[in-house]
Image: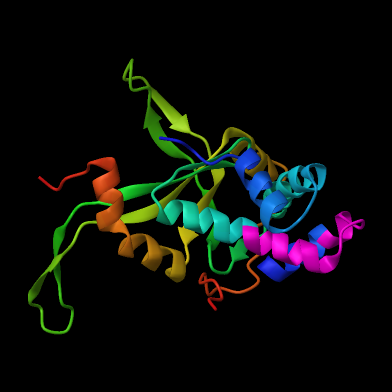
Amino acid sequence: MNAITKADIAEKLFNDVGLNKREAKDMVELFFEEVRAYLEQGQHVKLSGFGNFTLRDKSERPGRNPKTGEEIPITRRRVVTFRAGQKLKAKVEEQTDTIKQQTGVTDE
Amino acid sequence: MTKSELIEQLAAKQVHLAYKDIEIAVKTILEYMAEALTQGKRIEIRGFGSFSLHYRPPRVGRNPKTGGSVRLEGKYVPYFKPGKELRDRINASLQRGQMIIHDDETGEEGEV
């Protein structure tokens, strides 16, 4: 599938916002860097119309090496989860039939 | 952190750009990504993560009021997989003792 990248987003800013190529590229880099920096400072990030990035701490739990079956603890860690906002979820859900046709997914 | 705080922060760092342009740029980035997902496209941001759609097959649900069963159609839902740099930096912040800041507990975004 053709994925959208930072270059595509910068192109969009160049075309629609009128930033020059350099500014557009910097803006995209800085946008994602700022979100990372906020999360790194322990802050949840809420972007209305898109979704929320939330942090969660997970305590150590028993795990296994799937290959050897050997028991190894999974260390405590902090993870980020994304929850799409209502508006985005609704828009995606509305388009389900169209997307299914494009990707060839069937329920059978 | 909210969208307006993010705009403020970017404006403080991109002093050569007009505030209005930064505001429009942030909105454009988010709308563009939302639109891409709505069209079933994948988004891959190196060092941050990837957004894609996951399919939830049809299932039989329950009406919580009547207890009757309802057939729920299959649907796509947006999904985010954090990239390595993001995962590592967030995990490192725990290791150095950074607390998670819970400014409010709603967990819901402020929809417009």
Is residue A18 in view? yes
Q: Quadrant of the C terminus of chain B?
A: bottom right
Check residue B18 for magenta coloring. yes
Frontmost residue, A21 versus A45: A21
What secondary structure do most residues of the magenta stretch adopt?
A: helix
At a point 75% along the width and 43% down the height, the residue shown is A25
Q: Position of residue A41 (x, y in %)?
A: 72, 53
Q: Name the residue furthest bottom.
A: B65
Q: Which residues are magenta?
A: B11-28
Q: Is residue B15 above or below residue B104?
A: above
Frontmost residue, A86 versus B93: A86
At a point 64% along the width and 44% down the height, the residue shown is B90
Q: Name the residue furthest right.
A: B16
**Which quarter of the picture shows residue B72?**
bottom left
At a point 56% along the width and 37% down the height, the residue shown is B83
Judged left or right of residue B32, residue B80 is left
Is residue B2 in view? no
Q: Position of residue B77 (x, y in %)?
A: 35, 56
Q: Quadrant of the N terminus of chain B?
A: bottom right
